[in-house]
Amino acid sequence: KLTGEGKVRTGSLLAGAVLLALGACLHAPGSPENAAPVVAEVPAAGPMAEAFGPLARLAGTRWRGEPGEADKAHGQPADFSEWYWDLGGSVLVNRHVIADGSYGGVTYIQKNGKTGALDFVYITSAGFRTSGSFMLNEDGTWSSEEDLEGLPHIDKVRSTGRINEDGTMSSVSEFHGADGWTPGHTFVYTRTDEPLPELVPTGVPE
């Protein structure tokens, strides 16, 4: 069972996985006043961009995620994330680093040629990874369940979230381990032009 610092550290490590699913329901208007700050030199979308649906609009944006008040009280850091195309626009990439620079991860999203689903793999600087797929719900929310390999206390992550009227994105996660499903963390993401912190990995969490 995760409590205290261990739970907070795990939440930091899984922040990128949560944001990945969170981005899946991006439906923010594209008007200038709502335009996201653009990451410099982002490759243009390729002919497969349509397959990514609203996710395609994340390319070239950067976000800052703030944890909920309870998590902040336990030292949960903020999370910075940016999105871009790779492999000729056939893969959407998310890179994130937490505010203190001690941990980061990269997510690769690609349409499954057999099932048509948007599958992903999330690879981390701490030596673990997650993989799964997600769905967009008609009410504008998203849901995702991921398999996790490489951490001793958690084997799955389940997340739900939505786009809020003010343009922020909010998420709630749950972790699965020996005690079944337990509450994870909440994050609220806002668009930013702050650069990602320098990543200096501290290793695999205890």
Image (cartoon, rainbow, N blue to C red):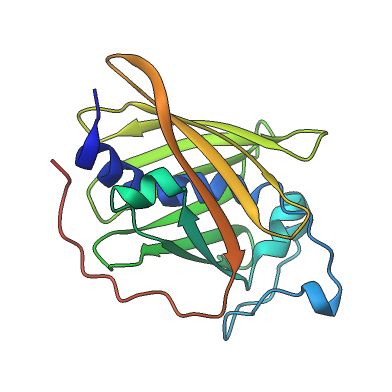
Give me the residue at 62% from left, 71% from top: 61
* Residue 160, above or below 121: above
The answer to whether 37 appears left or right of 174 in the picture is right
Coordinates of residue 26 in the picture (x, y in percent) = 72, 53
* Residue 148 appears in the figure: yes
Task: Count up the numbered dots.
Answer: 0
Residue shown at 49% from the left, 35% from the top? 173
Vertical order, 173 against 34 (above or below): above
- Viewer-side residue, 192 vs 148: 192
What residue is rendered at 39% in x and 39% in y? 130
Residue depicted at x 82% and y 33%: 138
Q: In this view, does 74 lie to the left or right of 64?
A: left
Could you tell whether 173 is left or right of 52 in the image?
Answer: left
Q: In which quarter of the image is residue 142?
A: top right
Residue 141: % across, % down: 72, 38
Quarter of the picture containing the N terminus is: top left
In this view, the residue farthest toward the bottom is 40
Task: Indicate whether 45 appears above or below 26.
Answer: below
> Looking at the rendering, in which quadrant would you find the C terminus?
top left
Residue 76 coordinates in the image, percent (x, y): 33, 52
Which of the 4 quarters of the picture holds residue 117?
top right
Q: Where is residue 40 in the image (x, y as percent from the top left)?
A: 57, 85
Tell me if I can see residue 128 in this picture.
no
